[in-house]
Image (cartoon, coloured by chain):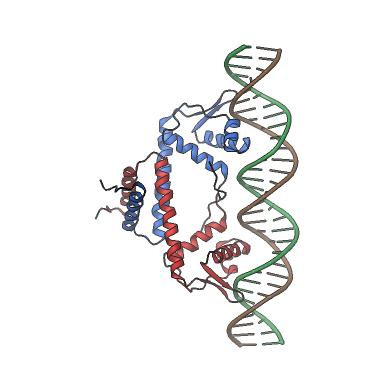
Chain colours: A blue, B red, C green, D brown
Amino acid sequence: MSFDPRIPIYLQIMEQIKKDIVSGKLKGGDKMPSVRALAKELQVNVNTVQRVYQELERDNILFSQRGIGSFVTENKETIEQIKEEMAHELLENFVHGMRELGFDDKSTLLALQQYMGREAQGNVKD
Amino acid sequence: MSFDPRIPIYLQIMEQIKKDIVSGKLKGGDKMPSVRALAKELQVNVNTVQRVYQELERDNILFSQRGIGSFVTENKETIEQIKEEMAHELLENFVHGMRELGFDDKSTLLALQQYMGREAQGNVKD
DNA sequence: CCTAGTGTACTATTTAACTATAACAGCAAT
DNA sequence: ATTGCTGTTATAGTTAAATAGTACACTAGG
């Protein structure tokens, strides 16, 4: 994982973990790497990872047990809620961003289909 | 304009100016507010605005003349290029972001249409 | 010439993120 | 008990963004 220097590292790690949970890559109850292990893997300081886990625990996404480890919440509602929040934010950024560039919604939709088509080397319109 | 504390202010101001140029709200040759005027308007320091103008000049989006003012470039190609870059970045963030949340492209497209429909209180599908 | 407004440059200070390092606290297996 | 892993807390130092304040350089208009 490489980091965007414009955004605090701990926020980027938080986002990545949330994505992994929301997409099912990490499941409810899964044990997270220890703060030290993740710090080493990501080449960041232990305190930074500790902050990540702390913030995620504050948001009820993880829970930590001293001496044992940190775990993904078992609460599926919480996870679904996070997913909706994240998707909503992406939608909002995209649509509003395109509007601010002068695209109307129809043009935006078209641009998206073209982009997806280009990436998939095939058309999304079935 | 209110600022996202997670991102440097000067970058946010840069983005806004670029959006205004790309969307046509600011046109080629237009005189920008003076660094002091914009600083006062945005409630930020003169140095911050100075940095914004300096960076935008480096990107050939503005040009500044000492004693006179700062102006939007007359080069339409540059503006068009910026517009494409910004649109591409939005598309990329959106599509990749949705994929990371576990949405396939078809679901993403549907979610977008629903979002646009909700906002417009009407359907985009003509 | 002189003034007012412009961009530009410089120094100093504050704040937050990040790092480095160490220590403390709790659990489990030997 | 001891060892080794865990989360947690604390202190200190570095870096970059942003601020505050000042000064300089240039241009236009009176």
Q: Which quarter of the picture shows residue B52?
A: bottom right
Q: Position of residue D24 (x, y in %)?
A: 72, 73
**Residue positioned 51% across, 26% down in the render:** A31
Residue at 44% from the left image edge and 58% from the top image edge:
B85
Q: Is residue A37 left or right of residue A109?
A: right
Q: In the rendered view, would you say C19 is above or below C3? A: above
Is residue C18 depicted above or below B24 in this figure?
above
Of residues A35 and B92, which is closer to you in this image?
B92
Residue for point 56% across, 56% down: B9
Q: Measuring from the top left, give residue B46's x and y in whole percent.
A: 62, 64
Question: Does B73 appear above or below A63?
Answer: below
Please state if A49 lies on the left or on the right of B73 as rendered.
Answer: right
Q: Is residue A29 above or below residue C5?
A: above
**What number of labels is visible?**
0
- Quadrant in which the C terminus of chain B is drawn: bottom left
Residue that lies at the very extreme toward the front in this rendered image: A121
Q: Could you tell whether A43 is left or right of B98 in the image?
A: right
User: Where residue B26 appears, x then y in whole percent?
Assistant: 46, 69
Q: In the picture, residue A34 is in which quadrant?
A: top right
The picture places residue A52, in percent across and down from the top left corner, at 56, 37
Taking the spot 46% from the left edge, 62% from the top edge, the residue there is: B82
